[in-house]
Amino acid sequence: MNLKDGLTALVVVTLWGLNFIAVKVALTVLSPFLLCSLRFALVAVLTVAFFRPQAYQLPRIAGLALVLGVGHFGLLFWGVAGMDAATAAIVTQLGVPFSVLLAWAFFGDRLGLRRGAGLVAAFSGVALLAGEPQLPATAPLVVAVIAMAAWAVSNIQVKKLGDIHPLALNGWMGLMTAPLLAGISLAAESGQGAALAAMTWPVVAAIAYTTIGSSLVAYTLWYRLVSRHDLSRLVPITLLGPVIGVAGGVLVLGEALTWQKVVGGAITVAGVALVQLAGQRGGERVEPGP
């Protein structure tokens, strides 16, 4: 990998790692499902006129709207509302272990000793976060973990789509997901009008970041890198994501850096790294999470 692509990969991981800070800023005014609905609506507005999937792909994208749009992003935003950005950045690393477990359970993939040890370490690290004093309740953590399981399921759905431009997928899934999340917001949340009226410029900037920066820009750059390089060369860089997320939470949001975050985060990242490295030795690829 040349220097330009290496720096591009670092930019992508930084955009993803800092995304939870933007989400936390936006959540100071907006409720989780309302924010998520706005995010998908903006993604759709910016892309659907320029990128279109094939007709046969639309029903499968609708399925992704339920699993990835609502089941992953909707639940993840709800979970993030009840935890700090640093913890959220660590929990999202569970997407890879869940993907491996699904491949083992439904497709007969072998786990092996190294992968098994990596899975145990990854989940143990997140379990350690449940005792973190900055976490007022365990429900948001559990919901965020479920959201990462939904992300793993969505990976299987994406593979069945066939050839599709990533922005076409993001845009049309956003078009289908936004009204679903808006309906959930109307049913389960309140004060949407007042929240929209109370948006400050930092909140607007945070929404723009999570829509354009961490979604459209980051994924466009990422898929360009994937088209040029073997995933095994890119995966180690993605492990910097939680490090950047934790550092951003501490430095930007003033979150406390507790021993649970340090130890639990280190164990989780080490476990995910072991899962990835073991998979590469076996000739398998596991797509990293956002």
Image (cartoon, rainbow, N blue to C red):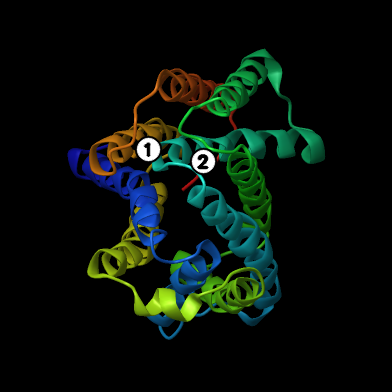
Residue at the image point whose x is 65% and y is 77% from the top? 58
Residue at numbered disc 1: 241
Q: How many marks?
A: 2
Q: Is residue 214 above or below residue 238?
A: below
Q: Is residue 213 visible in this depiction of the protein? A: yes
Are the residues at dot 1 and dot 2 in contact (C-beta closer than 8 Å)?
yes
In terms of image quadrants, where is residue 45? bottom left
Residue 248 location, x and y as percent? 29, 40
Residue at the image point whose x is 67% and y is 74% from the top? 187
Q: CA distance from mark 1 to mark 2?
A: 10 Å
Quarter of the image where the N terminus is located: top left
Residue at the image point whose x is 43% and y is 78% from the top? 194
Q: Residue furthest left?
A: 3
Q: Secondary structure at mark 2?
A: helix
Residue at numbered disc 2: 92
Q: Is residue 236 left or right of residue 66?
A: left
Q: Residues within 10 Å of mark 1 (few under 14, many from 20)?
A: many
Q: Is residue 165 visible in this depiction of the protein? A: no
Amino acid at the residue labelled 1: Gly
First in sequence: mark 1 or mark 2? Answer: 2
